């Protein structure tokens, strides 16, 4: 009997009934639901920005929120697809975040142009990045813990996308909490750090999502 | 001869790998064994094309079968089995090749060290080129020519490379090998 036959016999003996993993859309819905609860609770504790009602009449603010929400939804779906070895045979959908990030970038560029005369810069700077990062920790831990139960064949990309998804929750929270109108500040301290977060996610994914 | 349902499934149609996997997920050990055997038959030629030795193919095939076993909960039986399987196989193959080349790099001679050793005398200082030219002539023609040009005619490795149409690195490596052979012969 060859080694392969031995191994096949051994694996077959270990073949207990297995519960198939949930569909990636269900998985991403679970994450989105949990993130919605988390966002609601944190906003209830920290409070909404006082000028939110009037800002909801500003088309670029609404466009920014919608684009950020879309990034969060698409990255959640993409991370869930990437958790499966074959991306659940939905490769295009798994790579959709690229398009949505491009759309988000475009929205921010237009919002920056529309910010004329520019709103005054707030006195703080990096504190926003730190706050978003702290808010990101819990969703990031949860998504990595959840992703480790699957079998990603793109661990780096999965980690990067999952961390960006978690970071977008933190970014949404801060935009709804902080009374700040300076787009330059928002781009510099809220969204540019996303690049670094993506790379950190890539690195973490390669280490934590091995199987 | 009586064959099991699982074996019939595989014999009938390739598509039935999906059905076999569905049965396997319910804990059907015979279906699972048949599926894994069919899987290894599918993958062996795929790996053989990409790896040099049969033992490497066997090792990696075992690793892939274990990965299929670990990841079987990510397959629901409703989508084609082969793309799922090949995604795992390619992932493990990449891992294997990455480790293989990293290992080769670790064991490769550091070229800087090699260059340093080229400046060292490989024979006793009293030993001139003329005194060992007999041994040099016994070397392969290319190595003998390189040593003659470098030590009798006084050309640098770069100049020898230009003369022989080789790269400078190739000249240095060939010279290094020739020194080794000479040292062994002269130390006997």
Image (cartoon, rainbow, N blue to C red):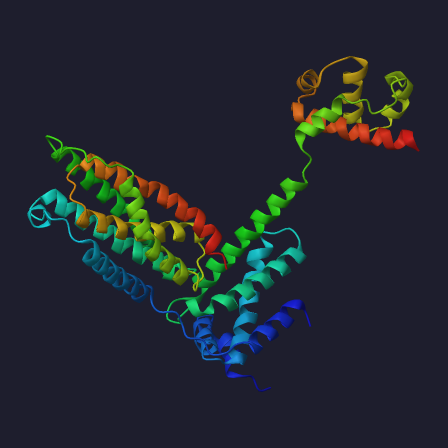
Left or right of B147 in this view: B87? left
Q: Nearer the viewer, residue A146 or B102?
A: A146
Residue at 50% x, 67% y is: B70
Residue at 86% x, 24% y is: B123
Q: Classify residue A58 by image quadrant.
A: top left
Q: Classify residue B81 by image quadrant.
A: bottom left
Residue at 35% x, 53% y is: A137
Residue at 75% x, 24% y is: B118
Label tally: 0
Q: Is residue A91 visible?
A: no
Q: Is residue A115 above or below residue B128?
A: below
The residue furthest bottom is B2
Q: Nearer the viewer, residue A112 or A130?
A: A130
Q: Is residue A15 above or below residue A140?
A: below
Estimate the x, y position of residue A199 in percent, counting from the top left: 39, 43
Estimate the x, y position of residue A177 in percent, counting from the top left: 18, 49
Q: Is residue B143 visible?
A: yes
What quarter of the picture does the N terminus of chain A occupy?
Answer: bottom right
The residue furthest right is B188
Estimate the x, y position of residue A63 in percent, counting from the top left: 15, 46
Q: Nearer the viewer, residue B115 or B59?
A: B115
Estimate the x, y position of residue B106 in percent, counting from the top left: 65, 41
Left or right of A77 in this view: B112? right
Q: Is residue B15 above or below residue A53?
A: below
The residue furthest top is B153
């Amino acid at each position: 009997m060859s080694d392969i036959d031995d191994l096949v016999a051994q694996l077959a003996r270990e073949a207990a009934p297995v519960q198939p993993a949930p569909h990636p859309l269900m998985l991403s819905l679970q994450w989105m639901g949990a993130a919605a609860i988390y966002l609601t609770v944190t906003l209830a504790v920290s409070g909404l920005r006082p000028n939110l009602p009037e800002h909801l009449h500003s088309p670029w603010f609404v466009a920014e929120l919608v684009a950020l929400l879309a990034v969060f939804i698409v990255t959640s779906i993409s991370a869930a697809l990437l958790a499966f070895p074959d991306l659940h045979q939905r490769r295009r959908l798994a790579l959709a975040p690229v398009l949505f990030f491009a759309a988000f970038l475009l929205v921010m560029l237009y919002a920056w142009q529309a910010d004329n005369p520019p709103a005054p810069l707030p006195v703080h700077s990096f504190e926003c990045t730190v706050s978003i990062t702290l808010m990101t920790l819990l969703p990031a831990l949860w998504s990595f813990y959840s992703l480790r139960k699957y079998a990603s064949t793109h661990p780096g990309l999965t980690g990067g996308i999952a961390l960006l998804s978690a970071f977008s929750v933190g970014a949404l929270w801060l935009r709804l909490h902080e009374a700040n109108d300076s787009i330059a500040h928002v781009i510099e301290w809220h969204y540019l750090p996303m690049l670094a977060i993506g790379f950190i996610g890539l690195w973490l994914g390669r280490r934590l999502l091995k199987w | 001869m009586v064959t099991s349902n699982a074996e019939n499934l595989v014999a009938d149609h390739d598509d039935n790998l999906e059905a076999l996997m569905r049965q396997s997920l319910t804990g059907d050990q015979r279906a699972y064994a048949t599926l894994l055997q069919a899987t290894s038959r599918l993958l062996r030629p795929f790996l053989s094309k990409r790896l040099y030795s049969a033992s490497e193919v066997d090792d990696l095939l075992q690793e892939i079968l274990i990965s299929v076993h670990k990841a079987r909960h990510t397959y629901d039986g409703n989508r084609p089995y082969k793309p799922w399987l090949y995604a795992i196989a390619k992932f493990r193959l990449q891992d294997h090749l990455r480790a293989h080349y990293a290992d080769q790099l670790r064991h490769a001679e550091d070229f800087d060290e090699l260059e340093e050793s080229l400046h060292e005398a490989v024979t006793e200082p009293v030993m001139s080129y003329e005194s060992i030219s007999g041994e040099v002539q016994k070397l392969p023609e290319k190595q003998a020519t390189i040593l003659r040009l470098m030590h009798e005619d006084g050309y640098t490795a770069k100049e020898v490379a230009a003369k022989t149409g080789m790269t400078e690195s190739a000249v240095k490596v060939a010279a290094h090998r020739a020194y080794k052979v000479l040292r062994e012969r002269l130390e006997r």
